[in-house]
Image (cartoon, rainbow, N blue to C red):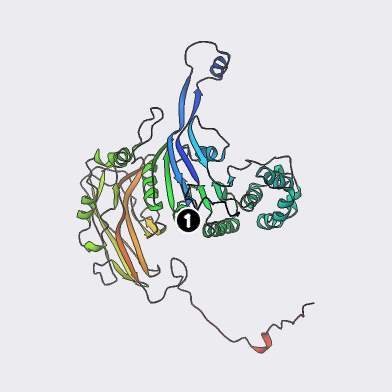
Amino acid sequence: MKENQISVQEIDIPAIEVKNVVKTYKLYDKPQDRLKEALGLGRKKVYKLHYALNGINMNINSGETVGIIGTNGSGKSTILKIITGVLNPTSGEVHVNGRISALLELGAGFNQEYSGLENVYLNGTMMGFSEKEIDEKLPAILEFADIGDYVYQPVKTYSSGMFVRLAFAVAINIEPEILIVDEALSVGDVFFQAKCYHKFEEFKKMGKTIVFVSHDLSSISKYCDRVFLLNQGNLLGEGSPKEMIDAYKRVLVGQYEVPEQKGPHLLDDEELRRAAGRSLESRGRSGGKRAEKAAAGAPEEALNPGALEYGTGQAQIEEFYITDERGVKSTAVIKGTEFTVHMRVRFLATVPAPIFAFSVKNVQGTEITGTNSMIEKAYLEPGKAGQVKDVTFTQRMSLQGGEYLLSLGVTGYNGENFEVYHRLYDVLNITVISDKNTVGFYDMESKIQVSDVPRNEETVIPFVKKA
């Protein structure tokens, strides 16, 4: 860098600024309506205006890894295409500070008739590199892609896995300051995905900015510093991965009320708060108070006062706690011993097939384990109004020593519709006590044996002197 140059990081300019971006599309009932409008025939409006993005504001700082989550059709890919310049917004502004490299949907930026090698040079040239500079980067690109002689074949002959290997290899080896990825990693095999996420780790350590869309919530939780939640073109919120993933799960089950689209409109903090809580309030729920009441028998210091609670109200978790191997109520469990999760459920209405569930997360919000009565085929009867059920889950504690969060739920299917009757997220802290922590989340309890090999069975490995 020259003496008079100042990097983006030094002056703390956001890597990406999205200001009140709106993207609309015209939807026609009949193909001839589009033609009539194009020819200027008729004065009647023959289309409906669809807001793919409805007044979106985002600030992404240099060096951040940011995730964008939401249901299909929420506008995730649209905002990425606008940031990268593939699409123009209907209104609003986008400012990008730094060299950007994007891996969008399969096929974007590649000429299907060209060979893989020709596409490498084509993409590099579009990014402003000279042929000599691409020559220098080519070995690293080909090594990462690892598609062998297929690089000399037209990309239209590639499998989806080969295509994404080459596309990702190009995207990360052209020295981007900002990397944008849209679901592309789910196409490659498990080994390639592992290699890509390892590269993510390297990029984070180098201070690169990463923005990616994924339905893999574990990856969002593990890699992202911040997450944006979109739904039906609206920005519902931004925050930590844990907060936004919990909110996203509410959206999936229809427990997160979304304002109607009425043209360009940015939700302020108060509207977001109301939208997040309206579905509970409309059913007479009392949030944390109900969770506190349900925690009868659980130590007060282990109860999460900010636990997320929602549901239709057809069933209610009235009580929950944990007992250790001796049957004593406790939230401290010794690794390797048996423990039981208890919950008492009251049915306020008849439900056809209730499902009782629990799950365990780490403090970063990654779901580690869990199960439910449907998976275990333990209870497949209707729940009748007025009934009260005691539900227990007993298992051996194999998690590593540390702090974890317990979530509980009563859900079920009404015909083909999945419904959440009552759910408590991260409601109770579990402390696992261990004097032996192995690698990863849980202990495989391996049995190790080392024995001598008889002399007559030894394999002799010849020593070969290197030239």
User: Counting other residues with Cα less than 10 Å from the Cα at mark 1, is it few (<14), some (14-19), or many (20 or more)?
Assistant: some
- In terms of image quadrants, where is residue 32? top right
* 414 in relation to 458, above or below: above
User: Is residue 258 in view from this perspective?
Assistant: yes
Image x and y of residue 220, in percent? 46, 52
The tally of labels here is 1
Which residue occupies 46% across, 24% down?
49
Relative horizontal placement of residue 68, taking residue 262 as reference (left or right): right
* Residue kind at label 1, given as amino acid type: Tyr
Give the residue at the far right of this rendering. 467
- In terms of image quadrants, where is residue 230? top left
Q: Which residue is mark 1?
A: 223
Image x and y of residue 72, in percent? 47, 39
Residue 16 versus residue 105: which sits nearer the camera? 16
Q: Secondary structure at mark 1?
A: helix
Residue 90 versus residue 32: which sits nearer the camera? 90
Give the residue at the far front of this rendering. 4
Which residue occupies 67% across, 85% down?
457
